[in-house]
Every structure is written in C-alpha cells, then in structure tokens.
Amino acid sequence: MKKPGIMGTLQLAATLVFALPVGLLGVQFLLDGETLLGGGFVAVAVVMVALEEYLTTPTDVPGVMAEKTIGKVVKTPDDEE
C-alpha cells in the first residue's frame, strides 16, 4: 500500500471525484429495486478506488525504485541494533 502524502491524497481525491457519483448512482438504483444494475455500479465504484490505491502505475515506478535502493544502501539506527 502506498504511503499517504500530498500527491497520494490528491490522486485519491481525483479518483473519488469520479467514483462517488458512480457509487451514488448505484445506491439510487438499489433503492429503486434494480439490484443487478445498482450492484454493478457500486462494484465499479469500489474497483475504481481499489485500482488507484493498489495498482502500480508508470509514475509510481521511480519512487518505488528509489525506496528500494535507499533502503539497501542506507541503514537506519533501528536496523543496526
């Protein structure tokens, strides 16, 4: 899971701008008795947020590589004990 930061928070907010209306549409369909369509829209909204949170994108790769490299080169005081 990504560490929350300013960019991560902004990316999540941008995803929620698109996912929340889809989820609310699904809830409205569920309340109207359209269970299949409503459940589908809610599932799509959940998948949108999950993909943003757990999928590694090309813009994430440099940060991941830097963290792994720095973690191997630099030892923190906790690692030395």
Image: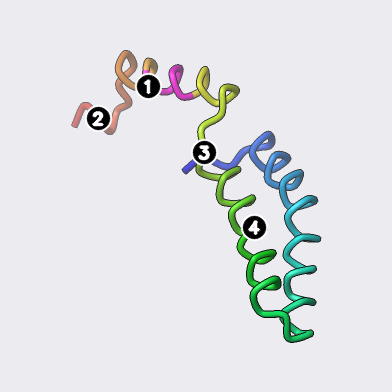
Is mark 1 in CB contact (under 8 Å) with mark 3? no
Q: Residue furthest left?
A: 81
Task: Say few, some or many: other residues with alpha carbon within 10 Å of mark 3 (under 14 / 14 to 19 / 20 or more).
Answer: few
- The residue tagged 4 is 44
26 relative position to 51: left or right? right
Residue name at image x 58 percent, y 42 percent: 4
Amino acid type, residue under disc 1 in the picture: Lys
Residues 23 and 12: in front is 23
> Is 67 covered by the magenta stretch?
yes
Q: CA distance from mark 3 to mark 2?
A: 29 Å
Between circles 2 and 4, the one closer to the viewer is 4
Between circles 1 and 4, the one closer to the viewer is 4
Q: On the image, which quarter does residue 39 sit in?
A: bottom right
Between circles 2 and 1, the one closer to the viewer is 1
Task: Say few, some or many: other residues with alpha carbon within 10 Å of mark 4 (under 14 / 14 to 19 / 20 or more).
Answer: some
Amino acid type, residue under disc 2 in the picture: Asp
Is tag 3's residue or tag 2's residue first in the polypeptide sequence?
Answer: 3
Amino acid type, residue under disc 4 in the picture: Val
- The residue tagged 3 is 55
Amino acid type, residue under disc 3 in the picture: Leu
Is tag 2's residue or tag 1's residue first in the polypeptide sequence?
Answer: 1
43 relative position to 73: left or right? right
Is tag 1's residue or tag 4's residue first in the polypeptide sequence?
Answer: 4
Is tag 2's residue or tag 4's residue first in the polypeptide sequence?
Answer: 4
Task: Say few, some or many: other residues with alpha carbon within 10 Å of mark 2 (under 14 / 14 to 19 / 20 or more).
Answer: few
Residue name at image x 64 percent, y 66 percent: 40
Circle number at residue 68: 1
Instruction: Tell me the element at label 4.
Output: helix
**Picture coordinates of residue 75 (x, y %)?**
30, 21
- The residue tagged 2 is 79
